[in-house]
Image: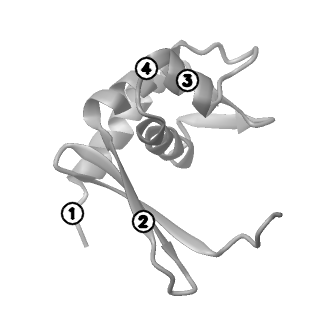
Amino acid sequence: MPTRARQRDVTFRVLDNHLVRTVSFADGQRGYEHRCSYQTYEAVADAVDQIPTEGEGVTLEPLARSLDLPYTQVNVALEFLKERGVVSTRARRNYPASNFAFEDALIEYHALREKPLD
C-alpha cells in the first residue's frame, strides 16, 4: 500500500573525503545520512561518462552491480550528479548531460568540498 510522500530537505557536503547526503523531514521526524567514498564517486562518474547520450541509459541497480560497489554509495553519487546537472534523467533512465560528464562531476565534487560548512 503506497504511503504519502513526506516533505524533505536534501543536502550534500564533503566530510572526511566522503560525499555525504543528509535528508531531513519537514514534519520533524528523524532524518538520515548516507555516505559515498571518493573512490566510489570517481567510479560512478567514470561509468556515467561512458554511457552513450542516446540509447538505453542506466539505472541504479545495474550500475551498482556492474561496478561491484555498494548500492547506497552509488545512489548517493548518482543523486548528487543529478542535482548538479551532470546527469539527466529521461523515462527513469540516466544519461550524461554533456560530453564531459567525468570532468563536470569532479568539478562539482571539488567545488562542494571547498564550500565552507555553515
Which of the two discs, 3 and 1, labels the residue nearer the N terminus?
3
C-alpha gap between disc 2 and disc 3: 23 Å
* Number of residue marks: 4
Who comes first in sequence, dot 3 or dot 4? 3
Q: Residue 34's x, y, as percent?
A: 38, 53
Q: Is residue 96 visible?
A: no
From this viewpoint, is residue 80 visible? yes
- Which circle's residue, 2 or 4, is located before the other in the chain? 2
C-alpha span from label 3 to label 4: 8 Å
Q: Residues within 10 Å of mark 2 (few under 14, many from 20)?
A: few
Residue hosting label 3: 63
Kindly identify which numbered label has been placed on residue 85: none
Residue 12, how many percent across, how many down?
Answer: 39, 57
Crowd tier of the residue under label 1, counting other residues whose Cα lies within 10 Å: few below 14, some 14–19, many 20 or above: few
Q: Amino acid at mark 3?
A: Leu
Residue at 69 percent across and 21 percent down: it is 57
Dot 3 and dot 4 residues touching (CB under 8 Å): no
Which residue, as the protein is rendered here, is positioned at the far bottom?
A: 28
